[in-house]
Image (cartoon, rainbow, N blue to C red):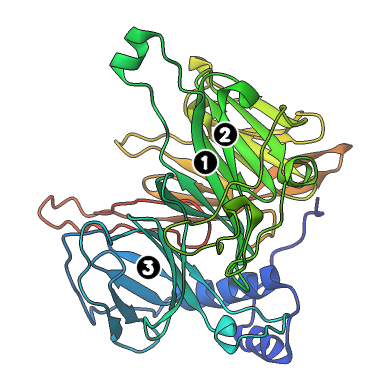
């Protein structure tokens, strides 16, 4: 927790000069870049003009200076004054279409054996079970891996950003006929975990009712933890490290033979990647909380979490609590009057600064945790700064955009008028 400091103006030239000399912490680099960007945007003489537009029937994605159209097939670079085409891939059939994708930046601190591993790439998951690694600049195919002939993988997400990725399968649901016959589906879904630089399989595991209990509605992987959501509004966290230590049966290497495939090659068609993590008992519980919409955010210094209690009287509020003892921070209940169809949202800033962003229909509050002078054991939530937007009252002037993963693992969809 940081002490409260006097606000002072930030000189963009000094920040750029410091960045040129090298900043080892990635979070600090992003934070300094945002300060420069904010100063430029908030200049009194700043004005904006339309330089380019394009429409699409499919979702438009943006990340790291690139705009993706037509389900990741067409890519435009935004580093120039007007977006320019980087590449256009051929149309793909329904079976070969990209289900999901992630942009991977090149590693700075590692020396890799294959030169292509140092280049930024797009990880793309297809409907027929292939994982492609494409050049982010040209769209050239750098690597492809066949995942499984039996498991339908559909979703990509970051466990640790730019380090570890997970692939989630569709959820197995009991049909009406199975319920009538008394047949119970034990398997809920499967997860595949990969290291990114270089692309290498960690393992495939099964999430089932016998180990994790009934009522599982969703599973994600984040920061080395498996996060399991339940129908009773409970969210539970389990350690991946513990699971690998206890339940990993064989270490797999892409392109090498495996005894689990009776000598066949890992990642080749039609064999895919075998399940090499067999969880036989429930792992130790790291953390559990009851929350609305099964949504909890963890971050800050020291560790805090943001959630909305499931009770009706807490609807529309966000609670900031210590991860150590679940105690509420001073001024830790944040709410925003939303006379709009769009609800507010609150999450930790992706720059690892520990700050929190509270986004409403017309205002964005950036909050931070500071030491409380009256109680050294507690932190206080204070406003760092806020930004307000003014919407046009003319209903004919509407613009809509859809953003996928502006920085982190999860999908964010927004619309503005």
| Residue 154 visible, this angle | yes
Residue 148 percent location from the top left of the image: 45, 52
Closer to the chain start, of discs 2 and 3, is 3
Q: Which residue position holds label 3? A: 62
Left-right relation of 36 to 74: right
Badge 2: residue crowd in 10 Å (few <14, some 14–19, many ≥20): many
Label 1 near label 2: C-beta < 8 Å?
yes
The secondary element bearing badge 1 is classed as strand
Mark pair 2, 1: CA separation: 6 Å
Residue 307 percent location from the top left of the image: 59, 33
Mark pair 2, 3: CA separation: 32 Å
Q: Which residue position holds label 1? A: 190
Badge 3: residue crowd in 10 Å (few <14, some 14–19, many ≥20): some
Q: Quadrant of the C terminus?
A: bottom left
Left-right relation of 315 to 222: left
Residue at the extreme right of the image, as rendered: 376
The secondary element bearing badge 3 is classed as strand
**Given this view, does label 1 or label 3 mark the residue nearer the observer?**
1
Closer to the chain start, of discs 2 and 1, is 1
Label 3 near label 2: C-beta < 8 Å?
no
Left-right relation of 349 to 7: left
**Given this view, does label 2 or label 3 mark the residue nearer the observer?**
2
Q: Which residue position holds label 2? A: 207
Mark pair 1, 3: CA separation: 28 Å
- Closest to the observer: 338 or 326? 326
């Amino acid at each position: 927790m940081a002490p409260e400091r006097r606000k002072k103006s930030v000189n963009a030239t000094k920040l750029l000069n410091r960045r040129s000399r090298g900043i080892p912490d990635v979070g600090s680099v992003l934070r300094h870049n945002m300060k420069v960007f904010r100063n430029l945007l908030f200049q009194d003489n700043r004005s904006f003009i339309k330089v380019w537009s394009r429409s699409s029937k499919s979702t438009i994605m943006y990340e790291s200076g690139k705009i993706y159209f037509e389900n990741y097939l067409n890519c435009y670079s935004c580093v120039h004054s007007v977006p320019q085409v980087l590449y256009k891939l051929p149309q793909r059939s329904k079976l070969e279409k990209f289900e999901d994708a992630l942009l991977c930046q090149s590693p700075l601190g590692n020396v890799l054996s294959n030169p292509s591993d140092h280049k930024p790439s797009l990880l793309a998951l297809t409907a027929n079970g292939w994982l492609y690694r494409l050049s982010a600049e040209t769209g050239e195919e750098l690597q492809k891996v066949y995942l499984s002939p039996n498991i339908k993988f559909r979703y990509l997400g970051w466990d640790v950003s730019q380090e570890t990725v997970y692939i989630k399968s569709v959820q197995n649901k009991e049909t009406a006929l199975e319920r009538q016959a008394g047949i119970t589906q034990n398997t809920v879904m499967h997860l595949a975990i990969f290291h990114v630089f270089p692309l290498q399989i960690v393992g495939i595991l099964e999430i089932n009712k016998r180990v994790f209990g009934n009522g599982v509605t969703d599973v994600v992987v984040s920061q080395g933890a498996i996060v399991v959501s339940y129908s009773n509004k409970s969210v539970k966290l389990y350690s991946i490290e513990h699971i690998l230590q206890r339940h990993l049966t064989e270490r797999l290497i892409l392109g090498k033979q495996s005894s689990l495939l009776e000598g066949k090659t890992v990642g080749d068609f039609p064999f895919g990647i075998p399940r090499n993590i067999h969880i036989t008992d429930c792992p130790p519980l790291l953390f559990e909380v009851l929350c609305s919409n099964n949504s909890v955010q963890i971050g800050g210094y020291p560790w805090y979490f943001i959630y909305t209690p499931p009770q009706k009287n807490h609807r529309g509020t966000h609670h900031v609590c210590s991860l150590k003892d679940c105690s509420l921070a001073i001024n830790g209940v944040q709410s925003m009057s939303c006379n709009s169809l769009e609800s507010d949202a609150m999450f930790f800033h992706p720059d690892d600064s520990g700050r929190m962003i509270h986004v409403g229909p017309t205002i964005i509050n950036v909050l931070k945790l500071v030491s409380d002078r009256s109680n050294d054991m507690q932190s206080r939530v204070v406003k760092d700064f806020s930004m307000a937007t003014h919407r046009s009252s003319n209903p004919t002037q509407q613009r809509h955009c859809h953003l996928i993963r502006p920085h982190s693992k999860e999908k964010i969809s927004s619309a503005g008028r």
